Image: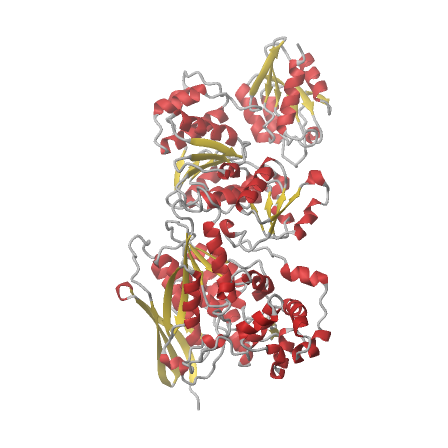
Amino acid sequence: MPLKPTIFKFISYKFEPGNKRVFFNYKQEFEGGESIVYTETLLLPKAPDIIGIPDGLLDKILQGVHLVLGISYYKLYCASIVRHDYALTKKEADFWSKVYKKGLGEFFYRNNLDPKISPKFSFDKSARAESFSLERNNKILVAVSGGKDSIVAAELLKEAASRPKGYPPAASQGGIDITAVFTETQRASDVVNKVTDILGVKSLKFRRILDSKILEKHRFSGHVPASAIFAFLGILYAVLYKYSYCAMANEYSSNFGNVKYRGEIINHQWSKSAEFENMFSDYVYNFITPDVKYFSLLRPFYEIRIAQLFLEYKKHFLYFSSCNKNFTVEETKKENKLWCGECPKCVFAFTLLSAFLSKKELLNVFKKNLYQDKNLLPLFKDILGLGKMKPFDCVGTFEESKTAFSLGAKKFKSELIARQLLPQVKVKKDLIKEVFSAKPAPNIPSQFKFSGMKSVLILGYGREGEVSKKYIEKNFPKFKIGIADQKFGKDYLKKQHNFDILIKTPLIPKEKIVIPYTTATNIFFSRIKGSGIKTIGVTGSKGKSTTASLIYAMLKEAGKKAVLAGNIGTPMLGFLLKPVSKDLIFVLEISSYQLDDIEFSPDVAVVTNLFPEHMDYHSGAKNYYKAKRNVIKFQNKNNVFVYNPKNKKLCQWAKETKAKAIPYIYIAENFLNGANISLIGRHNRENILAAATVAKEFGISDKAIKSAIEKFEPLPHRLEFVGEFNGIQFYDDAISTTPESTIAAIEALKNVDTIFLGGEDRGYDFSRLEKAIKKHKIRNAALFPESGRRIKVKGLKALKTRSMKEAVEFAYKNTGKGKICLLSSASPSYSLWKSFEKKGEQFARFVKALK
């Protein structure tokens, strides 16, 4: 009578870096019988340099590797209980429970087991999430397995490493550093060795030595989620040998399952799917390190699109193989044969490549005409969706198989398979377009998003769009380029479907994008990060333009090489159209629109203040603050966060950030007293403090800071003095489009008698503004639609108008001598004006006409 399994234990692991190996130990216990102990050994290609790796990081990774390798031993008996000694959080425990359940889905199906028996991992209620910071670089590990997909991924990364030309590439010395990585199981792979040689890149080869007892007869046998194992091993390798990227070649096709079983979708390729990739990436970010990125370069593409890309690398045709018989654990009789010609992967690969290769080229690869073999008819039916189910193997969808077969089998019309199945395969144009189109894959880092693409749409064609087009023309001259903008027609968003990828302008919400996309901001940072060039990013609900300009002025006063770019008017990507000096400092004003989908944070992040703004775009304050917080989300211990200590939310961010958090320093207060400073108002004093704090971080002297402050002229439309007419002073503060910023303007001037308010209605609460108007005894108001109608103060003389001219005449007639008329509308301008700049210019024009 077979022994009853009781508990499966994750016993221990032992890392011996000097001996280039790691041991992982497990125990299977039985009721009334001896336990079985398993030991798996991982052999490293060279002794790693672990100096500088944060304490606790390697243990955290090795715990994950221990747990994931254990799946190969757990499934031999499927004990009802698993035990480990790790202090997992609930989120980590849920992750592991799901990996075991979904990763063993095919195993449960084949062994007729209920997936509910899948183990539930325990967690420690007192455990807290912790991840570790690392130095980032542009070194990338790419997994190479010998198949066409991994070859395409590696070749595309090689192309990314050599493009774009000129300085700075993704890294200042030599660009992206690529290394092919492969984990052999038991024995070496001649296929992988040959492919790696042809690739011409460095390589790291590891070896798993499974416990020999795994080959004995057990209660169960079957499929394990190999890609999940390789994912954890990849992160281990990246940290040990100091790589910041771990690239796989998993494709869009792997997202689709094989069969539904007991309420669960069973997917042979689940650990290659986007679901697993997203889960795993989140796990790495939160519990291991945010500074190693795991992603699948080919995620946007069906297998058929990858096969089409493979045509460009014909040097690999006679040496690659996807046939699993080349990678079996058991020793098999050596045959000089890359393709068995009998398995689902051989049939699928043959079908795909038949769509693109000539008959002679195809047979030269496979050494056999699979369309002639009648024994393969059932397999072809399964591949094409004409059989019982999609085979349990790494094969693509029925749709792409049918498309490839319909295109390729026409060359083999006289062959048995083609004669029998072609009449049953009907492929419409929409289906062909679908399987050749690119799909969204947000996990791919920005510097690699163009890999494998052939066409790009510039979505939004203002100043930034024009620069983006020039960038693509310079760096991707073979790309088909399209332009879409609202000014060219209301259906401009529909043009997306005709392109592989798009570059989105910040003002278009990401929710409207249906194809892969990136932004000019992300492209810029992807090029700059790792180059040694410093970036200072300034954001905030108000004051970001003035603060950024002050920082720039201080840097220039100290003789530093600096440029001012971003939301302030000069597209940052434009600076990468020509060589850039390594000692340059970029001072960037960054809006919430740009931060909403940013994938990087600046080296120095500055947040001036926070209050609700752009609610229509962000669908509420929560999303707005979340977007703003991205300015520090990707920072590490080597970065700096400068913040306003008077803001509670920013103080909380300061506690949570991995960067060095610095509240405004008050050295600048010494410069403000008695100095000839043109900036007025408490909020501008805070802007000066923010800029001075950043300047001190760059070693700028007090003398240079003071000189820059005194020379600084206010920016247009920011409490800008327009002129004095008949004793009335007119100020243009058109930039103030929220109640909070208008209150700051009123408090700065203190002598306002007439105010211009209103504009696009975004549901702002005007109650505090109404109190400020009453407190400062403002007597008159010109109220513009739409929001002007909601602003009500008892005793206020109000003019409701759509005309700036009429409003200025009203102010001239009603404002007392020695008093101020202020344009500070507390609402966005778009109800009547294209921008706040246009509104301010119109105000100034009519004021000056009073002469």
Q: Position of residue 756 (x, y in %)?
A: 65, 23
Indicate left or right for 760 with 173 as reference.
Answer: right
Please report the residue visible at 64 percent of the width from the left and 32 percent of the height from the top: 828
Q: Position of residue 597 (x, y in %)?
A: 55, 46
Q: In this view, which residue lies farthest toward the bottom?
A: 1
Front-lying residue, 114 or 583: 583
Indicate left or right for 561 with 446 as reference.
Answer: left
Against 762, is 5 above or below? below
Against 237, is 762 above or below? above
Q: Position of residue 821 (x, y in %)?
A: 62, 17
Q: Quadrant of residue 422?
A: bottom right
The answer to whether one can see residue 653 in this image is yes
Q: In this view, which residue lies farthest toward the top?
A: 726
Q: Quadrant of the C terminus?
A: top right
Against 841, is 199 above or below? below
The tally of labels here is 0
Q: In this view, which residue lies farthest toward the front?
A: 360
Please report the residue visible at 68 percent of the width from the left and 48 percent of the height from the top: 495
Q: Position of residue 89 (x, y in %)?
A: 43, 60
Q: Quadrant of residue 848?
A: top right
